[in-house]
Image (cartoon, helix red, strand yellow):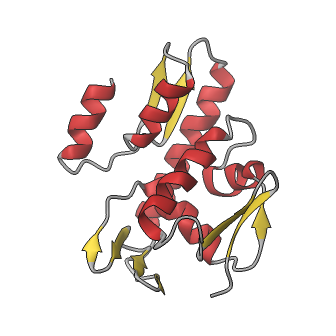
Amino acid sequence: GLDVLRRRRAHGDTAAVLLVSALGGDYDRLLGLDLHADDYVMKPFSLREVVKRVKALLGRTARLSEQPPMSRRYSAGRLSVDFGDQRATVDDAEIDLTVREVDLLEYLVTHPGEVFTREQLMRRVWGWDVGDTSTVTVHLRRMREWIAVDPSDPRIVVTVPGRAIGSSRG
């Protein structure tokens, strides 16, 4: 499954992906998310949880396809994002984003100065009431890799260790 996902993403496929796997270690889950899966469910799993996750994923992708093609843009320093087109550049070079990373960034930058727990972000961005918050952590880590000039001095997405995540006011 990971090899198929890796090849599809390498060829520009941006379809929503929910991985279901018996491999439940941190390494496997993080690798799946690093390969741009939108979610990762480990066996054994609750059928109700999988149904909720699929509905949230389908609902989010349906909302994205229903949105008018208007452009919603954000720029800060070397980062420029067009949320409508789901495209971002750093120093004028296009960067590889997942739909979920763009959704998360858009949520944070449209709520400047506010702080959120990982659980709140899962509810508000992913649409989940339950789930593994490491998903949020992985997406935030990947986001920081491409938006921070100096990852030790974040300017756009700021984490208060052990407490919350927020975006700066500028």
Taking the spot 31% from the left edge, 65% from the top edge, the residue there is 95
Quarter of the image for residue 78 reads bottom left
Percent x, y of residue 143: 49, 60
Using residue 61 as the reference point, say whether residue 2 is left or right of it: left
| Image: 74 above or below 19 | below
Q: In the picture, which quadrant includes the N terminus? A: top left
Quarter of the image for residue 86 reads bottom left
Furthest residue in direction left, as rendered: 11
Using residue 164 as the reference point, say whether residue 15 is left or right of it: left
* Residue 40 in sight from this viewpoint: yes
Q: Depth check: 53 or 23 in front?
A: 23
Q: Depth check: 158 or 122 in front?
A: 158
Using residue 1 as the reference point, say whether residue 43 is left or right of it: right
Percent x, y of residue 162: 80, 51
Taking the spot 26% from the left edge, 27% from the top edge, the residue there is 3
Taking the spot 47% from the left edge, 63% from the top edge, the residue there is 102
Percent x, y of residue 90: 35, 75
